[in-house]
Amino acid sequence: MNPIQGNVSIDAQNIMPIIKKWLYSDKDIFIREVISNACDAITKLRMVDYRLAEGCSVRVEVDKAAKVLRVIDDGVGMTQEEVEKNINQVAFSGAKSFLEEYAKDEDKENSGIIGHFGLGFYSVFMIADKVTIDTLSFREGAQAVRWESEDGMAFTMTASDRTTRGTTITLYVNDAEEEFLNYWRVHEVLDRYCSFMAYPIYLKEIKDEDVKVSGEGEEEQTEEKAETPINDAAPLYVKAPQDCTDEDYKAFYRKVFHEYEDPLFWIHLNVDYPFKLKGILYFPKLKEQFGGIEGQIKLYSGQVFVADNIKEVIPEFLMLLKGVIDCADFPLNVSRSFLQNDGYVRRISSHITKKVADKLTGMFKTEREAYEGFWPDIHPFIKYGVMRDEKFAERMKDCLLFKTTEGKMLTLEEYKRANGEKLENKMVYTSDAARQDAAIRLFTERGIDVAVMEHAIDVNFVSYMEYSAGAESKFRFCRVDAELDSLTSDEAAENIDSEMLTGLIREAAGKDDLEVNVKPLANEAIPLMLIEDEQTRRFNDMGRLYGRSEFSMPAKYSVVLNARSKTIRKLAEREKDERSLLLTRQLVDLAELSRQPLEAEKMTEFIRRSMEIVEMAAQL
């Protein structure tokens, strides 16, 4: 063929500034583009005649000495006309015209060409000073063609000496991007972007000393350095769930996410309608790691990696999971890195949420024991999802469990049925079972279940549950030290000077307006309890949780004196003096300690006072 020179035809504007803008932060993405184009070439060949495509592969060669990176495929190849159309006319989609010519209705499964020679190909000029394409079409009588350019704009086309079907793209890497001549750097990028591409990919390092070897009495010969297989062309998620074992799922999880601990369970997505969607979502063990845990959901389009954790597809609360999702119909933009924001994507996102909810509700209904066993690990994720996603909340509302201090797992309705006669429209809970043990016993000794809500997310969750119940609902969540209405009676405190005790407590606490109630409690061993206002405490807890404690409200609490306590009765019989104040201050601090640690100065005073009381007792 006669040499041809020219400039690349661009319909809109100069292409290189565009490429540098949308690929600048991820230069390594050029490898994905070139490899996916090579896979597309094999797909095209398979659509022409699947027998020709048997055994086809993509080979990547790193030649550091020559400062060259090669990508070689044995796919469909291109004629001179196809090079002019698909390379020189950037705005033209070669894949589209190819599909129009070869795609058949009965073979749509094989027509999912992700990329095409065009805009993605030109990303190579971000790292290369010169690029050549040597290609030979599968078409009978075709002549091999070489395309060469140093800037992605001006090009030269000549005859090529390639003798086998397919395409070789040679990148002459510039000095600033020599990292892409490092074998392990290229291996890392291939593993990231190409680990599940549909055809075998091999990586080979070319070294000067390995090029030729000779033995005694033998002619000099070329040595073939071993190629490293890169990808799994048939990953687990593309298989039918019935063909996968538990060990397969666990092995895939460990390999893809480099995890040593097995997941709790998983959801295998295999959807054909209303869109084709495949994938596996894993539930890792969260427990108390919820605050800092980062999930990872890898998004693929036709087995080509797109990105991690794309929020348009993956609802925020599902970001706590790990998994892979593949949909060949994702509406990607020109860089294949971001989704167009359309209704199609929202339907996919909603469907994924529904599948997760279906898995959880199905387990609750048919495998309640297993579901309860997973609850300590998955409850932060479920509660977060319920608060963030209205549809997920609606599906999960009857499957929310509340673990009690005695280890029972109860739904909200089960809790109401078990405790409704003793508690009126409320659930009592503890946020620290060890510290609040005395208050907990007041309830459990009367047969009232106390829910354990010790996780950071529970600060918000209890408020959400009350809010979502609606304004007409009077059901409330109360911490065990928030109110004791269910444990006290209105019977008069006989033979007790309530007025004197009230004055004594107020002076000991240093608050003239402190609310003091003298009521009989079931447990005689508890002399008094501090009752903190539930809503004020929640507000302050949330402030601390989000690091905004400067907006906290003054603590609002009252004191309940146990009319059945011998200690309180003895205090009521004494004259108000320094010893009475000393003992009362000690009782108030002990009650405070049962709720939370004392501040530094108060703790110092508490210890000093404790030593004084010990000395007084020793003198008796």
Image: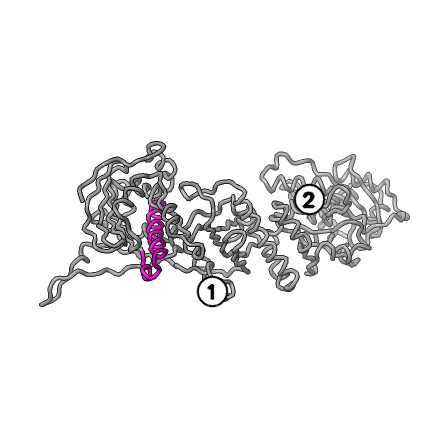
The residue carrying mark 1 is 248
Residue 336 visible (yes or no): yes
**Image coords of residue 150 (percent x, y):** 24, 38
Rendering coords of residue 16 (x, y %) = 32, 35
Q: Picture coordinates of residue 560 (x, y %)? A: 79, 45
| Quadrant of the rendering where the N terminus is positioned | top left
**Looking at the picture, which amino acid does disc 1 mark?**
Asp
Find out whether the residues at labels 2 and 1 contact each other: C-beta distance under 8 Å.
no
Q: Quadrant of residue 131?
A: top left
The residue closer to the viewer here, 384 or 198, is 198
Judge by depth and name the residue closer to the eye, 210 or 423.
210
Which amino acid, mark 2? Ser
Q: Secondary structure at mark 1?
A: helix
**SS majority, magenta:** helix
Q: Is residue 467 above or below residue 323?
A: above
In the image, what residue occupies the spot 70% across and 43% down? 467
Left or right: where 556 falls relative to 198: right
In terms of secondary structure, where does tag 2 sit? helix
Q: CA distance from mark 2 to mark 1?
A: 41 Å
Question: Which residue occupies 49% across, 62% down?
Answer: 240
Q: Earlier in the sequence, mark 2 or mark 1?
A: 1
The answer to which image quadrant residue 379 occupies is bottom right
Q: Nearer the viewer, mark 2 or mark 1?
A: 1
Residue that protrudes farthest toward the top in the picture:
13
Label total for image: 2
| Residue receiving disc 2 | 463
Q: Tell me the magenta residue range.
A: 29-57
Residue 40 on the magenta span: yes
As rendered, which of 607 and 271 lies closer to the eye?
A: 271
In the rendered image, the residue lying farthest to the left is: 217
Q: Is residue 382 magenta?
A: no
Q: Is residue 312 left or right of residue 367?
A: left
